[in-house]
Image (spheres, helix red, strand yellow):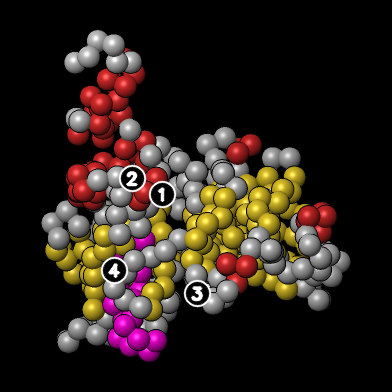
Amino acid sequence: MDPKRPHSRRSAEIIAGNDDLLTELILLHLPATSLLRFKSVSKHWQTLISAPSFVRQHTTHRGGGNSPPSFIFRSNSHKFFYFNPATKSLRRQKFYHRYRHTRILQSTNGLMLLECRKSKYGQKHYAVYNPTTRWSRTLIDAKRKNKAAISGVCLVFDPSRSPHYKIVCVRSGKNWEYSNPTIDIYDSQSGTWNYRLHFTPIKIKFSSGIYRNDCIYWIRPTSRSYYYNLQTEVEDKMINNLPRIKTPWRRNGETNKNYVMESNGHAHILCTYMGPEFKSMFVYELSEDNSGWYDKYRVDLGPISSVLAEKNDPVELVGIVRGEREGDSSVLLHSPGRIIRYTFSDGSFEVLVDFRNRSEIYKE
């Protein structure tokens, strides 16, 4: 080795030539977008980053540390956009999937659960997709012979506990009540559907389940809600009732919308009331032991008009962000062309991104 060459350059060459050092010191600390660019450095780097072992390591490393959440939007032109509140950036997100018609059902810690069709009204398939590596696995054919129709599918993935994921599939026919409803569970570690459990029919739609603390929740703000404990294997006692919640009545002229959202291990019901004179939001949180709901936040959204492009622009809820500290918690709102953050601790509004003049979002 030439003693005159800079020490930093020699160190960089040592790291680049050693897969273990390259992985531990650099690649594991990079976000998914950077990894996609680094794949083009060389065939060796592409192989290294695409390896299943590295994907598991990166997902565990990035997802196990309570990293700030990000969000995916779909425009009217059917384009997907990735939004990071921490960096206030909104960029195009291309999905490379073999099915032309794809709908994102769930996004959890870097993995996505997709509903896929080859044509607009074609047969449904369900797949798990990793946008970092563009790896996907089709898991469920919705019309397999001798199977009841699928009522709901939920992705279970917590990299702080395990690098493997599970898929919970409820089959109960097209109607709410089915004579022999079942729960099938796919385990990625074994690559098999491990067991098929039967439960007493209940009147509920099993779509839009959320995962929290080893439980799947089917929460309906205005009707009965239930949850399923993944650690329970006793039939007829798996589906448990959740306490009902009393939400405020809608006043004359108000528009009420209810949302069910999970953030950082907390399950919420968020209710917005938008009217010509008053704008408000109520946030309820489910207790850790599932024994009841309690008031978490009550928000006056009236001052939001100061950051809207037009005073009476409609406002939609994007998501809730629960931080490790109470002062870090916020809610994201969308009005035409803008994403706005409301911080619970000080009641402030901030426009995070203004994309009214970004033509690529609206073009076909």
The disc label shown at residue 127, or none: 4
Q: Which residue is mark 2?
A: 38
Name the spot of residue 135 as percent of width and height, x first. Answer: 26, 60
Name the spot of residue 187 as percent of width and height, x first. Answer: 20, 59
**Quadrant where the image shows the C terminus:** bottom right
Residue 193 shown left or right of residue 321 in the figure: left
Camera-nearest residue between 277 and 335: 335
The disc label shown at residue 122, or none: none
Q: Amino acid at mark 1?
A: Thr
Assess whether residue 91 is covered by the magenta stretch.
no
Q: Residue at x 21, y 48 (%)?
A: 43
Camera-nearest residue between 282 and 240: 282
The CA distance from mark 3 to mark 1 is 21 Å
The CA distance from mark 4 to mark 3 is 19 Å
Assess whether residue 124 is covered by the magenta stretch.
yes
The mark closer to the camera, 1 or 2, is: 2
Q: Which residue is mark 3?
A: 78
Q: Residue at x 38, y 39 (%)?
A: 30
SS for dot 4: strand
SS for dot 3: loop
- 363 over 265 or under it: above or below: below
Q: Amino acid at mark 4?
A: Ala
- Which stretch is magenta? 111-128
Label 2 neighbourhood size at 10 Å, few (<14), some (14-19), many (20+)? some
Q: Amino acid at mark 3?
A: His
Q: Are marks 1 and 4 in contact (CB under 8 Å)?
A: no
- 322 over 173 or under it: above or below: above
Q: Are marks 2 and 4 in contact (CB under 8 Å)?
A: no
Label 3 neighbourhood size at 10 Å, few (<14), some (14-19), many (20+)? some
The disc label shown at residue 33, or none: 1
